[in-house]
Image (cartoon, rainbow, N blue to C red):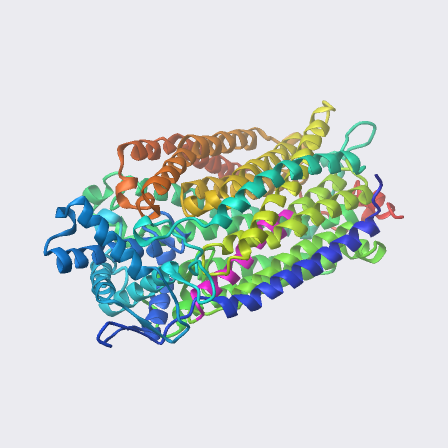
Amino acid sequence: MELTRKTIAKVIVAAFLLNLVVMGAGAWFAYQEAPPIPEEVVGPDGETIATGETVQDGKAAFQQYGLMNHGSILGNGAYYGEDYTAETLDLKTEHMREYYAQEEYGAGYDSLSSSERAAVDQTVRDDLDGAHDGSDTVQYSAAEAYAHEQVRETYVERYHEGDRDRGVPVGMIESTEEAEDFADFALWTAWFSHTDRPDGGNSYTNEWPYSPAAGNDATGAAMTWSVIAMVLLVAAAGAGILLYKSVKLPEPSAEGIAVPEPGDVSIFPSQRAALRFIPIAAGLFVAQVLLGGLLAHFYIERAGFFGIEELFGIHILQVLPFSIAKTWHIDLGILWIASTWLGAGLFLPPLLTGHEPRNQARYVNVLLGALVTVVVGGMGGIWLGANGYFDGQLWWLLGNEGLEYLEVGKVWQGGLLVGFVLWAILAIRGLKPLLDREPVYGLAHMILYAGGSITLLFVAGFMFTPSTNMAVTEFWRWWVVHMWVEGAFEFFIVAIIGLTLVSMNLLSRRSAEKAVMLQALLVMGTGVIGVSHHYWWIGMPDYWVPIGSIFSTLELLPLIFILYEAIGQYRAMTESGGFPYTLPFMFIVASGVWNFVGAGVLGFFINLPLINYYEHGTYLTVGHAHAAMFGAFGFLALGMVAYMLQLSIDPERWDGSWLRASFWCWNVGLALMVFVSVLPVGFLQLEVAFTEGYAAARSLAFYEGPLVQTLFWARLPGDSLLILGTVIYFADLIRKRFVLRRSADDPSVDDMAVAEGVLNDDD
């Protein structure tokens, strides 16, 4: 079956319009259907217990003090601490039981007979099992009012006064009043998790979290659509293989062609400037993996690190608590990968065009300087904001906005946005000879569309402030996070790989364009609306369950193509013994395999609605995230580094042995971490969530269980290999900086081994 590039382009436009309509309508409904923030919460005698203002102030405290990277809200955030929604619901039911036990029987709940406890349990469920009447006031029973005050006291003791056993530093929340407000905010999310919508039979969170004591259990839709998704998986997998075999897509091949040797390619000044992104990104990478080791150890020793407190008097819990370390760990991971991609996106154009725009190197250096400024300012602002050094609104503008993956202050986010725009301008300048000659669906255009989509989706992060309803905030946050990972980043992956294969002469430009466009169609056609599986339990309507089930399952389709692409690339790498770019290809192939394992296999499993209902916010998600983020996107970035360096060093001085050692350290380390430690902990959590309730699966008691602690220790070999590989990589970059070739003084198209052929490869 032959598909022309023009036909695929038309289908991509249709898919884009469908995405726009569905997600645009979803945004409108998000505001209409979000759980209401009551003007006040009153007790049985009309006394005010909480207000909408205290709930809003509590959300601000939750963000400012980095609590989303200590625990989670509505299942989203860090898994070190409790989930605040599930825990406050659990504490609420526990205190309500005690209240009714004393009222009805004059004794503690635990001392009651089984029949008496059953009667109290039913009374509590009846109290909580009601629909919202649509008014601006929430009416508490006496038991609920009592429970609310008890939870407040608990949160003040824990998050203001500190709790070393839980890894909570003293003064994590600066004042008692802010800690009480945070409790009000968490209890509000607990309230709408057990309160039914006015016009429906399910709660605002579709009965999440699982809590038998509160009457929350999985809905019928979760089971039905899980079964449908499994059937669709088989059909989609078969369809994906059939489509791949039916559509005539070219595979890279080194047979019978002249692959340009590294020594045949001159280095332009802008490319030397782009290489400077690599050591900066590598430094961020080293810091990230070291923080990752610290975070893993915090699960074993919550207030120390191998005795340094006793030896040196350093209170690491106060200096670098889990929440700050986790924030830096996540952001540094995004930044080093993005920095490497930015550098690669500016290094490759001269290979294809032989074109060096005037002052391009100077502008590349400006972009690098802006990136360093944003990184230093953003990372410093996070610590300063979380520790109360910014007054007024500056805490979220310059400090710590406190939302997972979007932690840096809005000003620094604006700086990143400007950086993306500047990168696009520089890429347009570099690719201009191709842009002028090719159609709008050409390969150079696809690179710009991929980069532009990353920029466009980042704008969604500016659609909310600390005063925005939490459910609406999460709606927009996932626009950035998920659509980056499952949409724009996947699009960029296939585009950058296509560009790389063309630069190696393994594919013609027209052939690469067709392959990239088809895969981009599958990625954008499934990954964008696929964000809806994140909306199931955060306070969005239940119609997202079928939508999310269908599109999350279909996300497997492009990953099958990417896996096949990796197999084709491996064949190209091995079919010729003299192929000079084996090392970069090893990273690209590993990226495709890990993408299929992390995003495909693990992603599909945890996104079945019924599984996700119980596992949401557990270590199964940790395994999926690490395999997909580092395995897919990190390895691609590192493969591009290997390719850029090999072209930039004289062949007789090139030594890839250290990079090869890092490659195996990373792969073996990631496999050990994911399959020996992280996933087994996740499956244990899933079992506890299913048998005892979600709050129990996220409790300190679960993490301190002997088997779980053993599995945490089992992570040490994998983490050590990841750190070792990164240190070797960083050391290798230092030594390679001294053997880089000088850039050409007066570069032209003749200095590029592939540029003339690429420019002549027109319809």
Q: Main secondary structure of the magenta part?
A: helix
Displayed quadrant of residue 493? top right
Displayed quadrant of residue 508? top right
Residue 28 position, x and y percent, is 57, 68
Out of 38 and 337, give the one closest to the viewer.
38
Establish if 568 lies above or below 437: above
> Hey, which residue is sitting farthest right in the picture?
763
Residue in view at x 55 percent, y 61 percent: 416
Establish if 114 lies above or below 69: above
Residue 385 position, x and y percent, is 36, 64
Residue in view at x 42 percent, y 68 percent: 396
Examine the structure image and report whether residue 82 is included in the region drawn in magenta.
no
Residue in view at x 56 percent, y 28 percent: 657
Displayed quadrant of residue 291? top left
> Hey, which residue is sitting farthest top in the picture?
577
- Magenta region: 468-490
Q: Which quarter shows the N terminus?
A: top right
Out of 205 and 111, give the one closest to the viewer.
111
> Hey, which residue is sitting farthest left in the picture?
106
How many numbered callouts? 0
Examine the structure image and report whether residue 485 is included in the region drawn in magenta.
yes
Out of 346 and 763, give the one closest to the viewer.
763
Q: Is residue 599 visible?
A: no
Left-right relation of 367 to 133: right
Q: Is residue 520 visible?
A: yes
Establish if 245 lies above or below 408: above
Residue 413 position, x and y percent, is 51, 63
Left-right relation of 147 to 10: left
Residue 69 position, x and y percent, is 38, 54
